[in-house]
Image (cartoon, grey):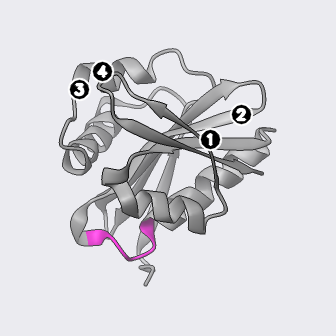
Amino acid sequence: MLSRNLNIQKITVAPSSDELKKIYTLYEKVFDNANKDSFLKKLENKKDLLLLLASIDGKPVGFKIGYALKGTVYYSWSGGVIQDYRQRGVAKALAYVQENWVRSKGYTRLRTKSMNRFRPMMILNLKNGFDIVDTDEDRNGNLEVIFEKKL
């Protein structure tokens, strides 16, 4: 059930230190292998960088980050919702806002990756109209599933 008190902030310019801190704090809570240096490096010099910050009653509960990949393909790099706020429609709302923004910028495809250990995200991608288009191995030898959606 989606909270009526959900607010999604769009950040399309360099995020303030406060915004970045909120998003990274969520990132740490969602991903057990969080590394601040690699997180910050990933955000450097990205075309059409979009950071979304979801809050309920003023409390940050989720995020979504994406950037231009190549041509008309946009990459949804990372996102998540903290445990206590899952199954409330937050991830779906973040995906909806991202897709609309990406479409408005002229992109025709949205791509993302996931792994078996993030099964809820894989299921959400399939429910939201993504197709599995390929697989890849990350630098640690873990299988990544590549999803793509035509916009």
The residue pinned by badge 4 equals 38
- In the rendered structure, are the residues bearing label 3 and label 2 in contact, judged by CB atoms less than 8 Å apart? no
Which residues are drawn in magenta?
85-90
Return the disc, 3 or 1, that comes first in the chain's sequence: 3
Overall secondary structure of the magenta section: loop
Label 3 is placed on what type of residue? Lys
Task: Give the image location of residue 89, x and y in percent.
Answer: 45, 73
> Going by the image, does 89 lie left or right of 31?
right
Task: Give the image location of residue 117, x and y in percent.
Answer: 30, 52
Label 2 is placed on what type of residue? Val
> Going by the image, does 100 lie left or right of 126?
right
Residue 36 is tagged as 3
Instruction: Please report the residue visible at 47 percent of the width from the left and 57 percent of the height from the top.
Output: 122
> Going by the image, does 126 lie left or right of 120?
right
Label 4 is placed on what type of residue? Ser
Instruction: Please report the residue visible at 21 percent of the width from the left and 42 percent of the height from the top.
Output: 28
The residue pinned by badge 1 equals 111
Return the disc, 2 or 4, that comes first in the chain's sequence: 4
Instruction: Please report the residue visible at 42 percent of the width from the left and 29 percent of the height from the top.
Output: 137
Look at discs 1 and 4 and give the one toward the viewer.
1
Return the disc, 3 or 2, that comes first in the chain's sequence: 3
The residue pinned by badge 2 equals 73
Instruction: For mark 1, give the secondary structure.
Output: strand
